[in-house]
Amino acid sequence: MMALTLSVTAQQQNIIVKRQGEGYMRANPERMHSNFTEDQQKQMQELRFKLQKENLQISNELNEKRAQLKTLQQVDKPNMKSINAKIDEISALQNKKMKLMAEHRNNVRNLLTDEQKVQFDLNWGKGMHKQGRKMHKQGVMIHRQGEKMQMMGERMHQQGQQMHREIEIRQIEKK
């Protein structure tokens, strides 16, 4: 049951990554498509593909690190040193992802004329609020699923402990 939930969660997170690459911001150069030369469009497409490829790899690593962090946090006696080290690894990957996005934006901007840069700069970041709300809703949904699974796991654990106690009592009574 737990593997199924982790699989669904990873799939949902990959969908988020895919959406980011397809139209992450309104400043997506494709929205200004008619203002670009064919050469600019080709170069932007190559840059976008490169970013998507790198972001996908980092997102996969982030998903793995987050799963490892959960495992570290859910043991009977969590090791805070290990937990903090895993958090640092996650932060480093998030930092890497942000730097890639900044580099991508700069590379796209360097392809533009001065007039195109003005338009690009005016539009950059618009629509992030809408995308952020979508991502937040998905995160809340994933979090709620996790809470439900945790509660089910706790109930099953309690039932298992109860059954274990009953077996021990029966074994004692037999002696």
Image (cartoon, rainbow, N blue to C red):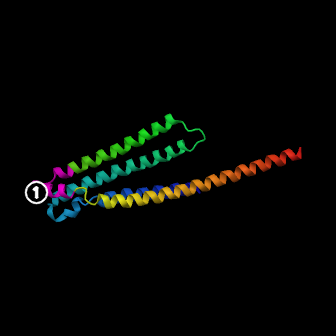
- Magenta run includes residue 62: no
- Seen in the picture, residue 117 relative to 90 is either above or below; the reply is below
Residue 20 as seen in the image, left or right of residue 42: right
Residue 6, percent across and down? Answer: 52, 54
Quadrant including the C terminus: top right
> Amino acid type of disc 1?
Glu
Residue 101, percent across and down? Answer: 28, 49
Residue most toward the right? 175
- Residue for point 56% across, 54% down: 3
- Residue for point 36% across, 60% down: 133
Number of numbered tags placed on the structure image: 1
Residue 48 as seen in the image, left or right of residue 34: right
Q: Which residues are magenta?
A: 107-123
- Residue for point 46% across, 37% down: 84
Q: Quarter of the image holding residue 76? A: top right
Residue 120 as seen in the image, left or right of residue 5: left
Which residue is nearer to you in this view: 43 or 136? Answer: 136
Prevailing SS of the magenta stretch: helix
- Residue for point 49% across, 34% down: 81
Which residue is nearer to you in this view: 56 or 87? Answer: 87
Which residue is nearer to you in this view: 126 or 109? Answer: 126
- Seen in the picture, residue 86 relative to 154 is either above or below; the reply is above
Secondary element under disc 1, as helix, strand or loop, is helix
- Magenta run includes residue 112: yes
Name the residue that disc number 1 marks: 115
Residue 13, percent across and down? Answer: 42, 56
Residue most toward the bottom? 34
Task: Give the crowd class for mark 1: few <14, some 14-19, many >=20 residues within 10 Å.
Answer: few
Residue 159, percent across and down? Answer: 70, 53
